[in-house]
Image: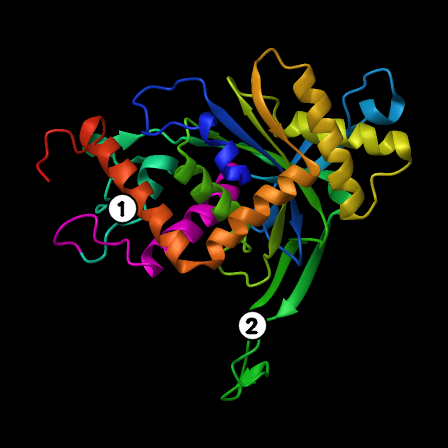
Amino acid sequence: MSILETLKPEFHSVLPRLASSRYIHFFIIRHSQSFPVFQTDGVLNTARTQAGLNSEDEQSSQMISRLVMFKRKQITPERLSGRQLLRSLGFTDLVEGESNFCDYNGEKTCKQCPDCILYGFGIGSRGAERSKVYSDSAFSLSPYDASHRSFTFNALFEGGTMIEQGKMRSSINELDHVLPEVAFPSVETLRDPTLEGFIYVLGNLLRTRRYGAQESRTGTMINHFVGLAFCDAEVFSNLYFTQAIYDALKQKGSINVPIGEIRKEAAVVAGNLLDREPLRISRMMFDSELAALLEEVTDIYQSEAKLRSILSLLCQQTQTYARTYGALVGKTE
Ligand SMILES: [Zn+2]
């Protein structure tokens, strides 16, 4: 039996109207692969936080600056990946007579596609749907000082020079960049999932590679999965997760270790923290079982036929939801 089949009891067969205490938590390490820019007004976002969780320990209790990856910087690129996929497979005719199905956060938001229903929308008086994908700001494991560099670069003309038609180019930009291989431990949560919705959100996490400023071409990141848990409530925050990993790695020597080490430690930490949460856990996945699940999901994304059948079911689910409880109540088909 495939792992996905064994998970079936964890899922709803239809999307419920009200929150029903089913949460899937994805424990991931977002890992920069080049020089992403998560900034507002030319500077990277930072926050002062306690290094770890242990107030008795000198290193753990010190305050450090950390890079911050705001929620929107995480979720927006993932939504766009999913929307691109839906469009590429032709799931764009959910609304009759509309060829370009769903305007992202705009006037023509369709209010019924997987993106609208799972990630939510708000268009003033014309309706809103709460997101079923929860995330929060993520913090760098390493201090800001060791995680960024400011680059000055000259914006060249197309010909590769600073001078065009005798005019000197004046735009010399200085931008603060995140360095490669900076880790941002994160928990992303999906509430009240169907199997198909789970595969969609998981796929978006696996397939999104470009985070950070839209105009920058350097924002590649990888999401490393370290664990997954099906619970009846929400769990610890990203910051708490990050601080606990910090403590665990410091205790072994240093936080400056290869990603393989961070992943291993993060999995142990997630398991330990879950043990202390006041909630019921119906299923947890780490290590080889998690790897096998990710392989099954990857296999689905490699097959157009499998993907089509799953996304088509998901579209039916979200449309049914929209017509029964959502913004399309009372509208004829
Ligand atoms: Zn939509």
The residue lying toward the viewer, choosing from 141 and 154, is 141
Label 2 near ligand 1 (CB < 8 Å): no
Q: Residue 254: where, in percent of width, then height?
A: 88, 38
Classify residue 82 as left or right of residue 176. left
- Residue 83 inside the magenta-drawn segment: yes
- Span shown in magenta: 71-98
Which residue lies under the disc numbered 1? 106
Residue 120 in view here: no
Q: Residue at x 71, y 47 (%)?
A: 182
**Residue type, label 2:** Ser
Residue 97 in view here: yes
The residue lying toward the viewer, choosing from 232 and 139, is 232
The relative height of residue 170 versus residue 51 in the rendered view (above or below) is below
Kind of element beneath mark 2? loop
The relative height of residue 308 versus residue 3 in the rendered view (above or below) is below
How packed is label 2: few (under 14 Cα within 10 Å), some, or many (20 or more)? few
Q: Residue 257: where, in percent of width, then height?
A: 83, 45
Question: Residue furthest toward the left?
Answer: 332
Q: Residue at x 57, y 72 (%)?
A: 155
Which residue lies under the disc numbered 2? 170
**Residue 19, quarter of picture:** top left
Answer with mark 1 or mark 2, whichever residue precedes in sequence.
1
**Residue type, label 1:** Gly
Classify residue 125 as left or right of residue 157. left
How packed is label 1: few (under 14 Cα within 10 Å), some, or many (20 or more)? few
Q: Quadrant of the C terminus?
A: top left
Q: Residue 265: where, in percent of width, then height?
A: 78, 35
Q: Main secondary structure of the magenta part?
A: helix
**Residue 162, quarter of picture:** bottom right
**Residue 194, quarter of picture:** top left
Q: Residue 183: where, in percent of width, then height?
A: 70, 44
Image quadrant, ligand 1: top left
